[in-house]
Image (cartoon, helix red, strand yellow):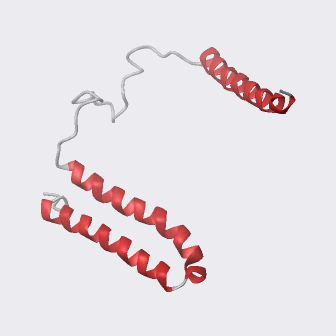
Amino acid sequence: MDDYVGLVAVLAVGLLGIAAVYVGARATAVHPAPVVALPFQSGHLPQEHALSRYHARWYPMTLLFLAFDIEMLFMYPWALVVLEEGLMAVVEMFLFLGILLVGVAWVWREGALRWV
Protein backbone atom coordinates (compact mmCIF):
# COMPACT_ATOMS: atom_id res chain seq x y z
CA MET A 1 0.00 0.00 0.00
CA ASP A 2 2.94 2.34 0.66
CA ASP A 3 3.90 2.07 -3.02
CA TYR A 4 0.76 3.93 -4.11
CA VAL A 5 0.91 6.82 -1.63
CA GLY A 6 2.99 8.95 -3.99
CA LEU A 7 0.67 8.25 -6.92
CA VAL A 8 -2.42 9.15 -4.87
CA ALA A 9 -0.70 12.33 -3.63
CA VAL A 10 0.17 13.42 -7.18
CA LEU A 11 -3.38 12.76 -8.36
CA ALA A 12 -4.83 14.67 -5.40
CA VAL A 13 -2.55 17.67 -5.99
CA GLY A 14 -3.42 17.63 -9.70
CA LEU A 15 -7.16 17.50 -9.05
CA LEU A 16 -6.92 20.26 -6.44
CA GLY A 17 -4.96 22.39 -8.92
CA ILE A 18 -7.59 21.90 -11.61
CA ALA A 19 -10.35 22.74 -9.12
CA ALA A 20 -8.46 25.87 -8.04
CA VAL A 21 -8.16 27.04 -11.65
CA TYR A 22 -11.89 26.54 -12.24
CA VAL A 23 -12.82 28.34 -9.02
CA GLY A 24 -10.43 31.19 -9.82
CA ALA A 25 -11.82 31.55 -13.33
CA ARG A 26 -15.39 31.57 -12.01
CA ALA A 27 -14.53 34.12 -9.31
CA THR A 28 -12.76 36.55 -11.65
CA ALA A 29 -15.03 36.17 -14.69
CA VAL A 30 -16.54 39.32 -16.15
CA HIS A 31 -20.18 39.00 -17.19
CA PRO A 32 -20.86 41.63 -19.87
CA ALA A 33 -24.27 42.90 -20.84
CA PRO A 34 -26.08 40.72 -23.43
CA VAL A 35 -25.60 43.31 -26.19
CA VAL A 36 -21.85 43.34 -25.62
CA ALA A 37 -21.72 39.52 -25.55
CA LEU A 38 -22.91 39.15 -29.17
CA PRO A 39 -20.40 37.58 -31.56
CA PHE A 40 -18.02 40.13 -33.02
CA GLN A 41 -17.91 40.38 -36.79
CA SER A 42 -17.38 43.98 -37.77
CA GLY A 43 -20.54 44.96 -35.92
CA HIS A 44 -22.81 42.75 -38.05
CA LEU A 45 -25.25 40.30 -36.52
CA PRO A 46 -24.63 36.65 -37.41
CA GLN A 47 -26.50 35.38 -40.47
CA GLU A 48 -26.87 31.81 -39.20
CA HIS A 49 -26.59 29.86 -35.98
CA ALA A 50 -23.09 28.96 -34.81
CA LEU A 51 -23.98 25.26 -34.74
CA SER A 52 -25.43 25.18 -38.25
CA ARG A 53 -24.40 22.32 -40.50
CA TYR A 54 -21.71 22.52 -43.11
CA HIS A 55 -22.50 21.70 -46.70
CA ALA A 56 -21.60 18.15 -47.69
CA ARG A 57 -19.12 19.39 -50.32
CA TRP A 58 -16.63 20.22 -47.54
CA TYR A 59 -16.30 16.65 -46.25
CA PRO A 60 -14.08 15.36 -49.11
CA MET A 61 -11.79 18.37 -48.62
CA THR A 62 -11.63 17.56 -44.92
CA LEU A 63 -10.64 13.99 -45.74
CA LEU A 64 -7.93 15.27 -48.07
CA PHE A 65 -6.55 17.51 -45.33
CA LEU A 66 -6.56 14.63 -42.84
CA ALA A 67 -4.77 12.39 -45.32
CA PHE A 68 -1.91 14.86 -45.70
CA ASP A 69 -1.91 15.62 -42.00
CA ILE A 70 -1.56 11.94 -41.09
CA GLU A 71 1.09 11.57 -43.79
CA MET A 72 3.26 14.15 -42.06
CA LEU A 73 2.58 12.54 -38.71
CA PHE A 74 4.17 9.33 -39.96
CA MET A 75 6.91 10.86 -42.10
CA TYR A 76 8.68 12.83 -39.39
CA PRO A 77 9.65 9.84 -37.22
CA TRP A 78 10.33 7.80 -40.37
CA ALA A 79 12.88 10.41 -41.49
CA LEU A 80 14.78 9.90 -38.24
CA VAL A 81 15.17 6.13 -38.58
CA VAL A 82 15.32 5.59 -42.35
CA LEU A 83 19.11 5.26 -42.40
CA GLU A 84 19.05 2.68 -39.63
CA GLU A 85 16.25 0.60 -41.17
CA GLY A 86 17.54 0.64 -44.74
CA LEU A 87 15.78 -0.08 -48.02
CA MET A 88 12.76 -1.77 -46.47
CA ALA A 89 11.80 1.48 -44.70
CA VAL A 90 11.93 3.34 -48.02
CA VAL A 91 9.74 0.69 -49.70
CA GLU A 92 7.22 0.84 -46.86
CA MET A 93 7.05 4.64 -47.02
CA PHE A 94 6.45 4.64 -50.77
CA LEU A 95 3.73 2.02 -50.29
CA PHE A 96 2.13 4.28 -47.67
CA LEU A 97 2.39 7.28 -50.00
CA GLY A 98 0.82 5.21 -52.78
CA ILE A 99 -2.17 4.45 -50.57
CA LEU A 100 -2.51 8.15 -49.82
CA LEU A 101 -2.26 8.92 -53.53
CA VAL A 102 -5.27 6.67 -54.11
CA GLY A 103 -7.16 8.82 -51.59
CA VAL A 104 -6.08 12.01 -53.36
CA ALA A 105 -7.21 10.55 -56.70
CA TRP A 106 -10.61 9.75 -55.18
CA VAL A 107 -10.97 13.29 -53.81
CA TRP A 108 -9.96 14.71 -57.19
CA ARG A 109 -12.52 12.50 -58.94
CA GLU A 110 -15.23 13.62 -56.50
CA GLY A 111 -14.46 17.23 -57.39
CA ALA A 112 -13.39 18.39 -53.95
CA LEU A 113 -10.47 20.31 -55.44
CA ARG A 114 -12.81 22.54 -57.47
CA TRP A 115 -13.70 25.63 -55.46
CA VAL A 116 -16.37 27.02 -57.75
Percent x, y for residue 33?
44, 14
Residue drawn at (60%, 17%) of the image: 26
Give the quadrant of residue 16: top right
Give the quadrant of residue 64: bottom left
Residue drawn at (66%, 26%) of the image: 18
Q: Is residue 65 left or right of residue 70?
A: left
Percent x, y for residue 36?
41, 20
Q: Nearer the viewer, residue 27 or 106?
A: 106
Outermost bottom residue: 87
Q: Nearer the viewer, residue 39 or 76?
A: 76
Instruction: Please tell me whether residue 26 is drawn above or below residue 62 in the rendered image.
Output: above
Instruction: Please tell me whether residue 100 is drawn above or below residue 112 in the rendered image.
Output: below
Give the quadrant of residue 52: top left
Percent x, y for residue 87?
49, 85
Instruction: Please tell me whether residue 26 is drawn above or below residue 79 in the rendered image.
Output: above
Q: Nearer the viewer, residue 58 or 78?
A: 78
Q: Quadrant of the N terminus?
A: top right
The mark total stands at 0
Instruction: Please tell me whether residue 59 is drawn above or below residue 71 in the rendered image.
Output: above
